[in-house]
Image (cartoon, helix red, strand yellow):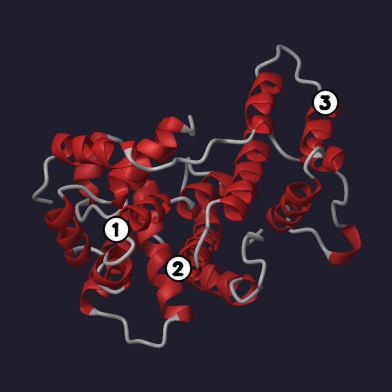
Amino acid sequence: MNIAMKEGMDEAKKLIQNLKIQSMPPEIYQLDELMLAEKPNMNQIANLLSKNPEILGEFLSLANKILQKTEDDLILEALAAVNLLGLQEIQRLFISCYLQKNLPVSDVDFKLIKNSTRSGIAAAELSYWVPEIGRTEAYFIAFLQDVGAIYMMRHDPENYAEQFLNLQLSNPVTAYQAELDHYHTAHSFVGSLVARRWHLGDLLCKSLLLHHYDSLEAVQNYDAKVAKMVALIQVSNVLVYRQFSDHYETHEQKQVFDHAVEFLALQPNAIEAASAALKKWGYDDHVHKASH
């Protein structure tokens, strides 16, 4: 990549100064306080989740998929989900549901969120074969990979999607480089800054920053877990393209895919499982329902 990290980050900081960045709902900060208690009170956490009925419904739906619940054994109450999920998992799923409802403001935004949600489904499935990366963690980070692109579209609504973002689906390295060259920053920098503003954790911020990076070995030297997450995103994105695009896979996509699969040592059964999850859940109108 030809743009230095410092220059890209400095330009991203200037860019977001002129944009309105959504705030996390107060429930998220209240959830943090409850989770940090010496002995977290599960009833209080459940009551907090229940304050927003619409988000609660989405949260329970997503939790049912993550826990692979059958139709006759669905989780229907917040307390049941709290007792079955870890606190970090609860937080990730709740934030995912909130952002999916509140971030998109245009048809292009909704299309982007849908694509990223599908990548989250594939990444969650693939995480079973990747040590150190949890299911909700993989879903959450892959889902948020292009949050910076939403703000780039607000920065340049006339040109960004058509001239830069859309081309990255089939040319994830060269089209991303074109974005860097044009703006002297990119959605990866913006997304990382937004995620830090939202206090969403170091792994997510670094993964967002580097998810288009074309040298997984260099990322591994920087942070091994980030490298795994970046590779997961890259594999997932190509699987989504294969399943839902009516265009042929490009040579560049195949190179990125093969390299990431080799880097993660993913066997054919892992790819098959992720593809099956996309076929099962990716066509759902409520595609935020994850693969487990």
Q: Is residue 169 above or below residue 216?
A: below
- Which residue appears at 82% of the width and 39% of the height? 50
Exactly how many numbered labels are in the figure? 3
> What residue is at 19 percent from the left and 44 percent from the top?
218
**Quarter of the image with the C terminus in it:** bottom right
The reply, left or right, for residue 93 in relation to residue 185 is right
> Which of the 4 image quarters holds residue 166?
bottom left
Residue denoted by label 1: 156
Q: Position of residue 274 (x, y in %)?
A: 53, 67
Tell me the amino acid under the disc marked 3.
Gln
Between disc 2 and disc 3, the foreground one is 2
The answer to which of 226 and 287 lies nearer the viewer is 287
The image quadrant of residue 8 is top left
Label 2 and label 1: CA atoms lie apart by: 13 Å
Where residue 135 appears, as percent x and y from the top left, is 57, 49
Of the residues under marks 2 and 1, which one precedes in the sequence?
2
The answer to whether residue 135 is left or right of residue 195 is right
Q: Is residue 212 above or below residue 77?
A: below
Q: Earlier in the sequence, mark 3 or mark 1?
A: 3
For badge 2, the amino acid type reads Val
Pointer 3: what residue? 44
- The kind of residue tagged 1 is Asp
Q: Nearer the viewer, mark 3 or mark 1?
A: 1
Where's residue 22, x and y in %?
51, 41
Q: Which residue is mark 2?
A: 108
